[in-house]
Image (cartoon, rainbow, N blue to C red):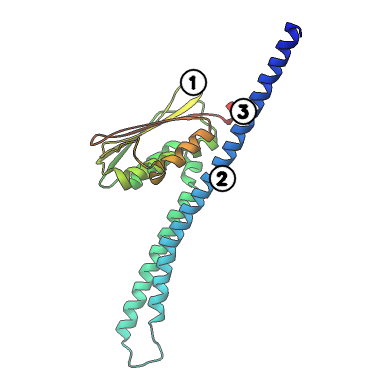
Amino acid sequence: MTAEKQLQIKNEQMKAKQLEMEARQQREIFRVTLRTQEEERRRISENLHNGLGQMLFSIKLNLDTIDLSDSLFSTEENRKKLKNAELLLANCIRESRRISHELMPSILEDFGLEAAIENICSQLTGPCNFVAEIEPIVPPADQEIQLAVYRIVQELALNIVKHSQATEASIKIYDSNEGFINATVSDNGIGFDIQKEDNNATGLLTIKHRVKMLRGNIHCSSQIGIGTDNKISLPKTIDTY
């Protein structure tokens, strides 16, 4: 067999391996997409069941106990139960708006990424003070990428509120000037051991899969008693995929 023929066979083998590797990557992306979508559905289902579902059931219980047929039944008691049902209905309306906002952040579409990130900080500021630092992204990232950044930052910010016991947190969005949009979410909370922590319990696994699916990078660092840093980098356009 000539050297030229050997080289041709080797190139064909390398090409076949590359195609197989790309096929495996595509299958993995598909699996990650399905898992991410399923996690989103599960979270929405929990919100509906634990929030709206329970409040609506409480309203039903209040209305079921009202007896309009018995003249001896206290009118004042009925009034109190109706008032309580009215308050619960108002809470249902607020909860439905909150869930709707999570499903489709209209503020992102109407006012852009800066306003949407600042809105996250405004909504979550309480015992922990959130501060946003957002630099102009020129040219702007694709809408799909902006939505991904918004969702990832939102999830990380919620993790801070739920788990970190932090008093200060910051969200920074900036342009790498190399075709990437970067986000840093940091806090001064209790931190955790990344090697031992169940990342899936805090949503980090889902976030990492999402970043990988978008062909970005994520780096998480944390120190016990000092805080946590999450740095994300995503391509600004899907054309680079």
At x 61%, y 34%, the residue is 26
Q: The residue under label 2 is which amino acid type?
A: Leu
As rendered, which of 241 and 87 lies closer to the eye?
241
Label drawn at residue 21: 3
x, y percent for residue 121: 35, 42
Residue 137 visible from this viewpoint: no
At x 49%, y 49%, the residue is 40
Label drawn at residue 178: 1
As rendered, which of 46 and 109 lies closer to the eye?
46
At x 58%, y 31%, the residue is 238
**Residue assigned mark 2:** 34
x, y percent for residue 162: 32, 48
Assign a secondary structure to mark 3.
helix
Label 3 vs label 2, nearer the camera: 3
Rendered position, 170 above or below 201: above
Q: The residue under label 1 is which amino acid type?
A: Glu
